[in-house]
Amino acid sequence: MSVNLASARVWRGTPQAIVACAAVIGLALIAPGEGYYLNILMQAATYAIAVSGLVIVLGYCGQISIAQAAFFGIGAYGVAIGTADFGLGFFPAMLCGVGAAGLLGLILGLGSLRLGGHYLAMVTISFQQIMTLFATNWISFTHGPDGIRNIPRPTLWGLSFQNGHAFLALCFVSLVLVTWMVWRLKTGRLGRAMQAVRDNELAAGTCGINVFATKVIAFGMSAVVGGVGGALFAGGFQYISPDQFTFAESIVLLTMALLGGAQSPFGSLVGTMLLVMLPEWLRFLKQVYLAVYGAAVILIMVFLPDGLWGLMLDRVIRRAKPIVGTVAPLPLLSEHGVESDEIVLKVEGLAKHFGGVKALDGVDLAVRRGSVHALIGPNGSGKSTFINVVTGLYKPTSGRVIFMGQDLTQAAPYVRNRAGLARTYQNIRVFRGMTVLENVMVGAERPGNDIAENPAAVVERALAALDFVGLRGDAHKQVGTLSYGHQRYVEIARGLAASPQTLLLDEPAAGLNMTEKHELGELLRRLKGHGMTILIIDHDMNLVEQVADHITVLNFGRRIADGLPNEVLAHPDVIAAYLGEPRNEAA
Amino acid sequence: MATFLQLLFTGLGIGAIYALVALGFVLLIRAANVVNFAQGQFAMLGAYFLVIGINVLELPYPVAIVMSVVLMAAFGVIFAGATYWPLRHRGGLPVIISTIGASIFLENTVLVLYGPSPEVLPNLFDSPGIQVGPVFMDSQYLAILVSAVLLVGLQYLIFEKTLLGKKLQATSQDKEMASLLGIPVAGMILFTFAYSSMLGGIAGMLVAPVLFVSVGMGGLIALKAFAANIIGGYGSIPGAILGGLSLGVAETMGASYISVPYKDAFAFAMLLMFLMVRPQGLFGEKISEKA
């Protein structure tokens, strides 16, 4: 392995985490063992754990949860009720509370995440209110508004956590572990999938990511982490009541994540510390401080979109280091490279009607392995609808899509990608919050790709794909800083890294200038030379003539010609469709 | 049966409040694609403006109402300037979060100024109400229902019959095209914010004499209005009205026949039910992003 990348290392961050554990244990031992300052530290540590949950669901996955205090409360009530009323030990009771938080999170997520992001926000607000209602009114179970007192602290393996130092150490170590896991999640496969979902749901789906499942997992994880924080909170303060877990607290937790920077667990740590301390510093403001909170949220969104941590990274730390070393060339190009009569993609009688508009009306098409098949037609002829139906973004009105012998007509986009169908978009859909390399890694991680399970090989495959399109040197740049044409190449590389059986290019030349179009032609010819199976949609006749082995022409949703390029382009119907009907000269 | 009819009347009255708040909410979604989490605080603010007008300035009711409506419209524009305008090019999420921030800011600012104890407004009418068959129609609830019908009717006329309405509709359908046709898109969006803030404010003023005027009143109303939107169909105007009304009725019936302390849980239960069974709501279309 000639390329070594931080995100591919199995033990990354472990030594730092161990050092941090030792440091926080030391800190807990010298910190005050009781009283006001202990409470502040305990609160900061347990809140910070809950806020890391928001980093997962909001920062990584882009879904708004306004019920983190409810999950925090469920964890806390699990410990309190479990120990007080059911005679459980601290840790078994904690397990119940955290389990309940996770389960409720999954149920809420399953109900609301199939729809857009604001649905989760609404559902979590409602859930938050309901949980407060239950905690206050279901007195036989929750002890009602008086709360629960004398919550015991645990003893584990002969180690007693009864005194303040020991329990604070437990909270601190938990915080370090949670932070470490959340940090690692970000650079792992699941975390990348979450970020891809955050940045572009449609593109994530056509990169083989099950968008719905990814969102549910992110939300479930955040609920569990919230529960863990709450359970420790209950042990720390040994008294809980419903008013500690209200909507207002959820907002406080959300603000902590945003202020520090929801994209990073370190940011959320900074945000939490600051906002736990801030009320102390802002004592002179008295009740005004919640109003200041509200105003702060708006100001943060306007002036600090990435939070304090993001600002620090931008100003101080962020440096793009080029990756040196050689990578093996893309294997896919030799693997599937033989042109044959095997039909890879077969479309039969495909129709898509939008109300009365027949965007597609019974189109047949067959793409042979190793060929470059072009689908052309004037504006509004149904080309984009065709590619969207084939990749599963639209459900067809009738007809069948058969790919590699599998009937995928009803399959979700991510299922089609996993079968080996990759695509690019006419209006570029890259994952804007991620680097060029990460974008392409998402493609390489398509389940079903030969190297998807091996993190180091994923990096190598992604670099090889970037090499192929000539963007290796930009691997560590944020993708948004690239020019439009180069972003298109990132999309193509993302498709190539997935080692697809067929690559669908949706108007790749759209929006490119002459030089860029020329380069694109070169790239396509190289791909063709390697025997990649391509279905390309474009207006640019010049480009199509250069690369196509076979051309299908659409007009008004119907196929008007199909065959070899020179035959098709000379076909009178095609000329008429592009240039208009000839006048009757004789008349 | 008599109880049932009585509950239906009360439920429709409360439901009309939810419907008005939900309506303002939908209009913002359609015009600016903004999911406004401070919609309930508009209602709260409207009620407090009325309190200022009547209890502090001792204005007569009609004058105080006009003053409050005008103030709400102005507030809508300020609100847009603070929470929407600077973030309008950054996608939906930042705006949502900033409206959440605004809701906290508004609630707590009013809390600081007015304190936690609720304010009481006198009834709008001297007569407590009229008896129609078995149903006693409380004058305030009647006022709510009549005002809601008038407002919805007025809105229908504006949107369907005037040039301004056509411009607003064009803006909500396709901003780029609308601006190419010379429609001042920014102005249309600001107008929608003002109008939506006004609707929320009026809902708050109408409900003020029925409930007490308190800082927290908006949050709960907004929660119900959100639920009404999903039940009616996300982004649908008739959906918001019908969703609001049915929610008000369901909640009033539920509180009476099932449980009072969990009255506020019925909205949530209905919301979850719809999400599971019919996520597009009563009138909604399947929402899908264009590739």
Image: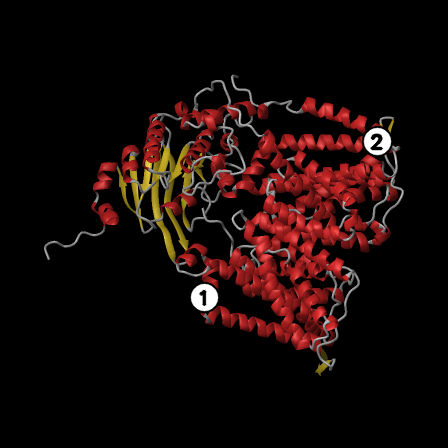
Residue placed furthest toward the front: A284
Q: Chain of mark 2?
A: A
Instruction: Please name whichever residue, A289 or B210, is drawn nearer the observer in this view of the structure.
Output: A289
* Residue bearing the label numbered 1: B166
Q: Are marks 2 and 1 in contact (CB under 8 Å)?
A: no
Secondary structure of the residue carrying numbered label 1: helix
Number of labels in the image equals: 2
- Please give left or right for residue A536 compared with residue B259 in the image: left
Instruction: Please name whichever residue, A443 or B119, is drawn nearer the observer in this view of the structure.
Output: B119
Where residue A137 sits, quadrant-wise, is bottom right
Residue placed furthest toward the left: A586
- Residue neighbourhood size for the residue with mark 2, other residues' Cα within 10 Å, grouped as few (<14), some (14–19), many (≥20): some
* Residue bearing the label numbered 2: A31
- Residue neighbourhood size for the residue with mark 1, other residues' Cα within 10 Å, grouped as few (<14), some (14–19), many (≥20): some
Q: Alpha-carbon distance for marks 2 and 1?
A: 67 Å
Amino acid type of disc 2? Ala
Residue A484 seen anywhere in this rendered image of the structure: yes
Q: How is the structure coloured here?
A: secondary structure
Q: Chain of mark 1?
A: B
Where residue A177 sits, quadrant-wise, is top right
- Please give left or right for residue A390 compared with residue A46 in the image: left
Amino acid type of disc 1? Lys
Q: Position of residue A240 (x, y in %)?
A: 83, 46
Seen in the picture, residue B165 relative to A538 is either above or below; the reply is below
Where residue B134 sits, quadrant-wise, is bottom right
Secondary structure of the residue carrying numbered label 2: loop
Instruction: Please name whichever residue, A574 or B258, is drawn nearer the observer in this view of the structure.
Output: A574
- Please give left or right for residue A203 compared with residue B116 in the image: left
What residue is at 42 percent from the left and 41 percent from the top? Answer: A425
Co-location on one chain, circles 2 and 1: no
Residue B282 seen anywhere in this rendered image of the structure: no
